[in-house]
Image (cartoon, rainbow, N blue to C red):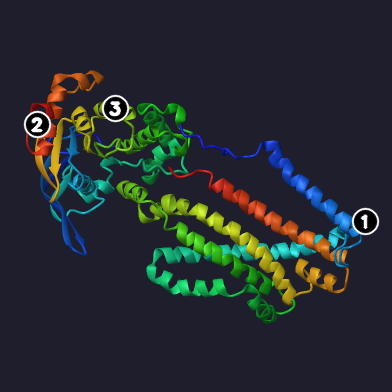
Amino acid sequence: MTLREVQGPTALPNWLRFVAPVVVGILLVAVWVLAVDVLKIAPRMVPGPAAIGAELALRIGIIGDDMLITGTNALVGLLFGALLGVVLAGFAAAARPIDGMLAPLVAALAVVPIVALTPILNTMFGASSQFGRQAVAAIAAFIPVFINVLRGLRQTRPVHRDLLRASGATGWQTFRKLTLPTALPYLVTGVRIAASLAVISALVAEYFGGPADGIGTAIASYAKSGRAALAWAYVAGAIAIGLLFFLVTSLLERLVTRRSPV
Amino acid sequence: MTTVTTTSIPAVKAEGVGKTFPTKGGDVVALTGVELEVAAGEFVSLIGPSGCGKSTLLRLIADLDEASTGTLEIFGKPARAARVDQDYGIAFQQSGLLPWRTVAGNMALPLELHGVGAADRVTRVAELAELVGLSDFVDRYPDQLSGGMQQRVAIARALAEHPRLLLMDEPFGALDEMTREYLQSELARIAAETAAAVVFVTHSIPEAVFLSDRVVVMSPRPGRITDVIETGLGANRAEALRESPEYFAKVTEVREALHGAPVERANER
């Protein structure tokens, strides 16, 4: 019976692993308060945590609305990008010529800085449509999903392929019972990487035009107009979205990759 | 589910079977001129050094590769038809369990592939788990089992559809000696209970003698059958057999057949 070792020899005790980051957090906040509110040596655009907290509490309604817009854009982009990545990776894995056709295209997409496309897409789809932003998020999410899934679809082991052939499985059965489950951990890893990229892209896309809503737009306009505390409150909202996407996809990855191969 | 209507049809019948692999440096003859008949219910081991084509022969019988020459019939059918009809079960050196499926899920895989209903699957999995002594472990995942237990799951999976022929490619090759001997006894019992013919690839002489009715000795370059030895050890494969003189005599006979000449002991020189 092989039970996996949970803790290595250098692992910290459980209570310390929980307490250590909390202590670091409290220390940082203390230094922050000291610099801003007590010593008053911080730049004007860096307000204290209390001021940011107050703005956050006061404007939670509109911040929430904007979070919803940016979060939705990121989610739509992530879903479409991931879907496109899975479908195209499936084609590429099925036929070498398609792989050859797609490879340079994907490489080109992967090296295009997302900010380079953003103003063009935003102008293309106009000031009343979120589509440009969603498209930017989708492109960003597509790349890691495509690359990971394509890799995952090629990871079936010879002994498993022999087994399914010897069991008289049809091509579709082999795909469903073997190829797909083998690729699943690669898919969720791709989606986890893509989730963070989708949030960043959806947010950055708002700095370059499009409708006058969303977290990114708010941060840009309040920073320019000198309302530092409110801008930072929006940053907190952006962090919350990123964290949510990261946690959900990490959890998904954990669930799927629970079983190690034998 | 098929029942044995006649025992006169051999489980495996190979006539002039050969296999050639094309490579850059020219064709490599992996197997040539194989004449072999395995009767229904018979236990036959293929033994020989690396490169003698024993695994290749097993893969040809299983229709995982195609013979280049000769004819190969499984229960009177071409190998391909026998594979599609699931006339055999197979186990490999690696257990080949799907890590995302439980023990029960792995045992049920062949049943699922052939549209056996959920209720029947549950019944059959319970029987199989009982047969290989894993009833308490059906909900475990492969990575929670020892190597020997994984191999038992693989054997249960091979037996899922009551095959009349069991093909095994060094199934105990990666296990320690104690587990190995234990599983050999288990396999002898299971083979007797299911009355299935077995073609068993191994490179262990004692293993081949202990399990088999006949030991087929093979030789490399090119892979071919050089000798067939009847063990004549009967149906009783109890542990005591391992200590009996007949057993040792057969081990010596197979060893000499493998080396091509009587082996001189060092102290007799």
- Between the C-alphas of marks 2 and 1, the distance is 95 Å
Mark 3 packing: few (<14 Cα in 10 Å), some, or many (20+)?
Answer: some
- Image position, residue B245 (x, y; %): 14, 20
- Image position, residue A190 (x, y; %): 55, 59
Q: Is residue A93 above or below residue B164?
A: below
**Amino acid type at mark 1:** Val
Q: Is residue B243 above or below residue A131?
A: above
The residue singled out by tag 3 in the image is B181
Q: Is residue A59 above or below residue B100?
A: below
Chain name for mark 3? B
Q: Nearer the viewer, residue A16 or A190?
A: A16
Chain name for mark 1? A
> From where the camera sits, is residue B218 visible?
yes
The residue singled out by tag 1 in the image is A38
- Residue at 63% x, 77% y is A117
- Whether callout 3 and callout 2 share a subunit is answered yes
- Residue at 39% x, 32% y is B149
- Say if mark 1 contacts mark 3, CB within 8 Å: no
